[in-house]
Image (spheres, rainbow, N blue to C red):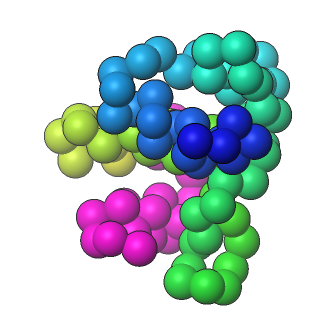
Amino acid sequence: MSISDPLTLLRDFTTSGRNVQLLENHIVFGSTRFERSAPSAYREARKKGSYYPIDALCFFLQVVPSPLSKFCAAIETIGGDWSGALSLGVRFARPP
């Protein structure tokens, strides 16, 4: 596992049930920290488009197990862009 890749760390921590901390402007994986806005290796569109920031993926993983109504409320709470949020949901539902 590369400790320089926030997406790899997010996957590892999520699948193993380890805690990911959001502290001010950082996301912390054990003793490794990144800026919350650090780009992940996950793009908004296949092989084109911007990279999702790691905190957006972390947020998505926190709310995706919720019922759709809670997911929608969470997106509205943070003032999220529905098109980006929905494409993120679709991308996670299908293998990249």
As displayed, is residue 43 above or below residue 70? below
As displayed, is residue 4 above or below residue 40? above
In the figure, is residue 13 to the left or right of 68?
right
- Tell which residue pokes out farthest to the left in this image: 67
Residue 95 colored magenta? yes
Q: Which residues are magenta?
A: 73-96
Q: Which quarter of the rendered picture does the N terminus lie within?
A: top right
Q: Which quarter of the rendered picture does the C terminus lie within?
A: bottom left
Residue 78 colored magenta? yes
Which residue occupies 66% across, 43% down? 2
In the figure, is residue 41 to the left or right of 15?
right
As displayed, is residue 65 above or below residue 53? above
**Residue 79 seen anywhere in this rendered image of the structure:** no
**Residue 26 seen anywhere in this rendered image of the structure:** yes
Which residue occupies 81% across, 34% down? 35
As displayed, is residue 24 above or below residue 3? above
Which residue occupies 61% across, 70% down? 43
Nearest the eye: 7 or 92: 7
